[in-house]
Amino acid sequence: MNKEEFKAKANQKIDEISAKINEFEAKKEFIKDDVKQKYEETIKDLEASKVELQAKYDELVAASDEKWDEIKAAFSSAADSFKEGFSKISSLF
């Protein structure tokens, strides 16, 4: 996969993560009171991680050839960490 293809997929990944966070935000009112605080905290954590992921994407876009592989790996790792967060929040249902 070349740089432009990876950038496009990375941008798509950010959009998917944003949509998933919005979906969880919309479901917040259906959460039982005893886990609502944990649910809200997890959403805040996901949103903070999304901001960090966006910053990594910005680095990726501006990356020189020498730093490309390093920044690409950092972005991929950060994006993969959302799987754990989404799993964690889904378990609160």
Image: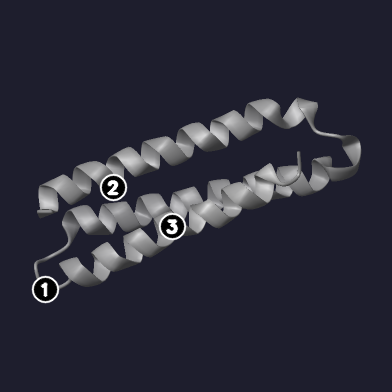
Q: CA distance from mark 3 to mark 2?
A: 11 Å
- For disc 3, the marked residue is 80
Residue 14 drawn at (x, y percent): 38, 42
Q: Amino acid at mark 3?
A: Asp
| Circles 3 and 2: CB atoms closer than 8 Å | no
Foreground: disc 3 or disc 1: 3
Q: Position of residue 87 (x, y in %)?
A: 61, 50
Alpha carbons under labels 2 and 1: distance apart: 19 Å
Using the image, tell me which numbered label, if any, was put on residue 44.
none
Residue that numbered label 1 is attached to: 66
Is the residue marked by circle 1 packed among few (<14), some (14-19), or many (20+) residues within 10 Å?
few
Q: Is 70 left, or right, of 29 in this rendering?
A: left
Kind of residue at badge 1 = Glu
Provide the residue designation for mark 2: 10
Q: Residue at x 29, y 67 (%)?
A: 73
Q: Earlier in the sequence, mark 3 or mark 2?
A: 2
Image quarter (top left, top right, bottom left or bottom right) of the N terminus: bottom left
In the displayed structure, does residue 93 sit left or right of residue 55?
A: right
Q: Amino acid at mark 2?
A: Ala
The residue furthest right is 34
Q: Is residue 70 left or right of residue 65?
A: right
Q: Secondary structure at mark 1?
A: loop
Q: Are marks 3 and 1 in contact (CB under 8 Å)?
A: no
The x, y position of residue 93, in whole percent, is: 76, 38
Could you say which quadrant of the image residue 80 lies in? bottom left
Q: Residue at x 57, y 56 (%)?
A: 84
- Where 40 falls versus 70 (above or below)? above
> Which residue is nearer to you in this view: 55 or 87?
87
- Mark 3: few, some, or many residues within 10 Å (few <14, many ≥20)? few
Foreground mark, 2 or 1, reads 2
Secondary structure beneath label 2 = helix
